[in-house]
């Protein structure tokens, strides 16, 4: 799909279960599925379709879309045109500028995708967009939920936007505080407060906005941290073990719970986020989202009693893995 920005134009490849350039009056909900570090959008698109199948009647009016963030070597390997957007191997995860065809942020590409679904001529019945990411896709999505510019525009037209952040290796903090204070800025790990772990040296897409406004807007957005109760292995599945990530906790579940506590301390009265844990599931994209807990979050239904839920008024710290 085309991405047109003041910094240039490009094409973002997407997988979709319906034509993306034709009217779809029956679509009421859109799932935008972010791929992981392997840049395998086809796999995550297939997962999105499995989620819809698992949901039964709830999934009958859902459109599934999976954007593909490529590197330049990917684009060459698939003989794609030079106007296909491509980033560095890590750059797409943090909103950095593309290497081709112009310096277009991966966040701007997601803005374009959201803006597409705001088109009432194509989607007259659309009421909800759910952006979902697991692992590296959740890293991208959490930062985009902070800095992205299109969500409120859709809300003004009656389309809600929810961000489902599942088991990322790290989160974006707004100051120098970290759960493991021994390795933060000014100490053994100055990188702990650099982008994408903190706001220092953030990319142009981010610093072109008021940094204080980013946090106040973020905490009001509809964000769910979907965390695997068994995602407690500090060495598994591409986990970030840099000092900047280790400053946030030893493993993904601990990092997610610690980040939520951090936000609660900073926003005791206006935090709209919540944590939903998925019992018995570790670092597994499909099992997370097709679980009863995951489906309830994706379709905005009552969460089963078996799913631990933490809100701004409930405790969320657990010291040890179970």
Image (cartoon, rainbow, N blue to C red):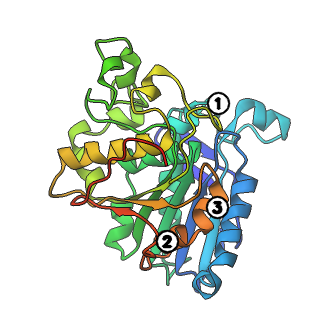
Checking the image for residue 124, the label placed there is: none
In front: mark 1 or mark 2? 1
Residue 101 in picture, x, y percent from top left: 64, 35
Proximity of marks 3 and 2: CB atoms separated by less than 8 Å? no
Residue 154 in picture, x, y percent from top left: 39, 67
Residue occupying the point 54% across, 38% down: 93
Question: Which of pointers 3 and 2 lies earlier in the amino acid sequence?
Answer: 2
- Assign a secondary structure to mark 1: loop
Question: Which of pointers 1 and 2 lies earlier in the amino acid sequence?
Answer: 1
In front: mark 1 or mark 3? 3
Q: Around disc 2, counting alpha carbons within 10 Å, would you say few (fewer than 14), some (14 to 19), or many (20 or more)?
A: some
Circle 2 is placed at which residue position? 119
Residue 16 in picture, x, y percent from top left: 69, 65
Q: Around disc 1, counting alpha carbons within 10 Å, would you say few (fewer than 14), some (14 to 19), or many (20 or more)?
A: some
Residue 160 in picture, x, y percent from top left: 39, 71
| Camera-nearest residue between 320 and 186 | 320
Checking the image for residue 89, the label placed there is: 1
Checking the image for residue 287, the label placed there is: 3
């Amino acid at each position: 799909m085309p991405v047109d920005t003041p910094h240039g134009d490009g094409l973002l490849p997407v997988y979709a279960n319906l034509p993306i350039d034709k009217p779809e009056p029956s679509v009421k909900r859109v799932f935008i599925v972010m791929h992981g570090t392997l840049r395998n959008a086809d796999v995550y698109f297939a997962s999105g379709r499995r989620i819809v199948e698992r949901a039964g009647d709830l999934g009958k009016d859902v459109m599934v879309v999976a954007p593909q963030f490529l590197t330049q070597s990917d684009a060459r390997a698939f003989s794609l045109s030079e106007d296909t957007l491509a980033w560095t191997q890590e750059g797409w995860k943090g909103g950095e500028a593309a290497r081709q065809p112009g310096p277009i942020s991966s966040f701007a590409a997601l803005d374009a995708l959201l803006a597409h679904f705001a088109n009432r001529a194509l989607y007259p019945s659309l009421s909800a967009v759910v952006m979902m990411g697991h692992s590296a896709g959740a890293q991208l999505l959490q930062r985009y939920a902070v800095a992205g510019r299109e969500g409120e525009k859709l809300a003004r037209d009656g389309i809600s936007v929810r961000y489902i952040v599942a088991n990322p290796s790290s989160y974006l903090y707004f100051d120098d505080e970290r759960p493991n204070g021994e390795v933060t800025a000014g100490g053994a790990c100055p990188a702990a407060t650099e982008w994408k772990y903190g706001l220092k040296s953030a990319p142009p897409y981010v610093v072109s906005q008021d940094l204080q406004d980013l946090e106040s807007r973020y905490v009001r957005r509809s964000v769910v941290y979907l965390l695997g109760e068994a995602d407690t292995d500090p060495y598994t599945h591409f986990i970030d073990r840099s000092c900047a990530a280790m400053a946030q906790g030893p493993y993904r579940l601990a990092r997610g719970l610690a980040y939520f506590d951090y936000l609660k301390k900073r926003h005791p009265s206006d935090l709209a986020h919540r944590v939903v844990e998925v019992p018995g599931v570790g670092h597994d994209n499909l099992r997370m989202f097709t679980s009863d807990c995951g489906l309830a979050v994706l379709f905005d239904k009552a969460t089963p009693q078996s799913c631990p839920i933490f809100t701004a008024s409930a405790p969320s710290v657990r010291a040890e893995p179970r």
